[in-house]
Amino acid sequence: MSMKMRLCIIILIIFALVSVIYLVKRNKLNLKYSLVWIALLIMGFVCVIFPQLIVFVNKIFGFQLPSNLIFAGMIFILFILFIIALSLTVIVSSMATRTRLLLQEVSLLKERVRILENEKR
């Protein structure tokens, strides 16, 4: 990989890392989910800085080519992202149900207040 390309990737990783940290500071991103992104970005950064690490890990796992290791890593990352997406879908569904129940409860309370105000008159 050329030095120019490595520098571009490093800049992109740093930008992504700063963005994740910014979102956590502003409470836009839950810390639990940010840790996954931060870990992936740090792993990417280490691999760009030390490309021979990929060859070393490739030999440990017994892949024929480093590109096969990278492909397996991408599949693993996609699996993690799938689990996160599924988890967030469950959370959104739960929040939608809670919102509907709260809306119904508020409507009932408003009706009670209206009835009590009419009784006082």
Image: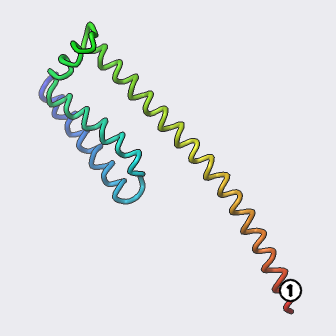
The residue that disc 1 covers is 118
As drawn, 64 above or below 27: above
Q: Which residue lies furthest to the bottom in this view?
A: 121
The colour mode here is rainbow
Going by the numbered disc 1, the residue's amino acid type is Asn
- Splitting the image into 4 quarters, where does residue 10 fall? top left
User: On the picture, is 38 further left or further right than 91?
Assistant: left
Looking at the picture, how far across and down is residue 36, in whole percent? 36, 40
Residue name at image x 43 percent, y 32 percent: 80
Of residue 30 and residue 19, the one placed in the foreground of this image is 30
**Rendering quarter of residue 59:** top left
Please give the name of the residue rendered at 65% of the width and 56% of the height, measured from the top-left corner: 98
Nearest the viewer among 117 and 8 is 117
Q: Label 1 neighbourhood size at 10 Å, few (<14), some (14-19), many (20+)?
A: few
Residue at (70% x, 57% y) in the render: 100
Q: Is mark 1 on a helix, strand or loop?
A: helix
Image quadrant in which the C terminus is located:
bottom right
Which residue occupies the extreme left position in the image? 3
Q: Where is residue 43 in the image (x, y as percent from the top left)?
A: 25, 33
Which percent across, then down, holds residue 17?
28, 45
Residue 54: image location, x then y, percent: 21, 21
Quadrant in which the N terminus is drawn: top left
90 horizontally vs 115: left or right: left
Q: Is residue 114 above or below residue 81?
A: below
Residue found at the far top of this picture: 64
Instruction: Answer above or below: position of 118 versus 36.
Output: below
- Please state if 113 lies on the left or on the right of 60 as rendered: right
